[in-house]
Amino acid sequence: MRSQEDEVLSISIDAVNTTDTAASPKKARAATTDIASSQQQLDHILTSLDADKAEDIVQIDLRGKSAIGDYMVICSGRSSRQVASIAEKLVDKLKHDLGRASRVEGKETGDWVLIDTGDVIVHVFRPEVRDFYQLEKMWVPAGGPGAEAPHTPPTSPG
């Protein structure tokens, strides 16, 4: 005998399964979750980083260059505490505002935090660690296209 809860759950699952999205996995994902586009995610990330006083924000366009994501964002915090705080706030904002769960590595030490949203990869570094690894040089040749460095915060009119 099925409980009322079981019936409600099966109806919800059946409703998702009977949509016309079976032919397209991408349509099926979009139908079952409300996920922001990579550009919307990038804009949201840059706004959050600016609000949390991240420094030297660099965005790199990876479209057509790598399958790891559409964009990479690299920034710095002044201390381990600020790096961890920037990362934590960003993950919370992405989840709350865009419904986007992110994978996070390195928050415990606060030297280098990696946040993977699927479409946008964010690296938050302490300045010394960032100087040591120099990720920007790995992804963008000197003077080459693909990076917008550094990111400047939006200015308000007036």
Image (spheres, helix red, strand yellow):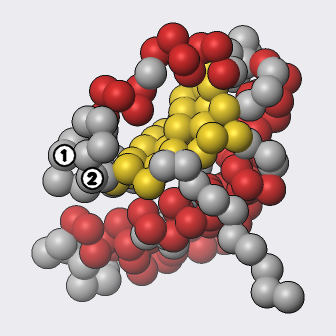
Q: Position of residue 35 (x, y in %)?
A: 49, 67
Q: Position of residue 83 (x, y in %)?
A: 74, 29
Counting residues from the start of the chain, the first of labels 2 and 1 encountered is: 1
62 horizontally vs 124: left or right: left
71 horizontally vs 4: left or right: left
Q: Amino acid at mark 2?
A: Pro
- Specify the label residue 45 is tagged with: none
- How many residues crowd mark 2 within 10 Å: few (<14), some (14–19), many (20+)? few
Query: Mark 2 sits on what residue?
Result: 145
Kindly identify the residue that appears in the image at 31 percent across and 83 percent down: 19
Query: Mark 1 sits on what residue?
Result: 65
SS for tag 1?
loop
Question: In whole angstroms, how far apart are the C-alphas of marks 2 and 1?
Answer: 12 Å
Q: Is residue 136 above or below residue 67?
A: above
Q: Position of residue 21 (x, y in %)?
A: 25, 78
Kindly identify the residue that appears in the image at 59 percent across and 14 percent down: 129
As drawn, the residue found furthest toward the left would be 23
Q: Amino acid at mark 1?
A: Lys
Residue 104 in sight? no
Q: In front here: 56 or 4?
A: 56
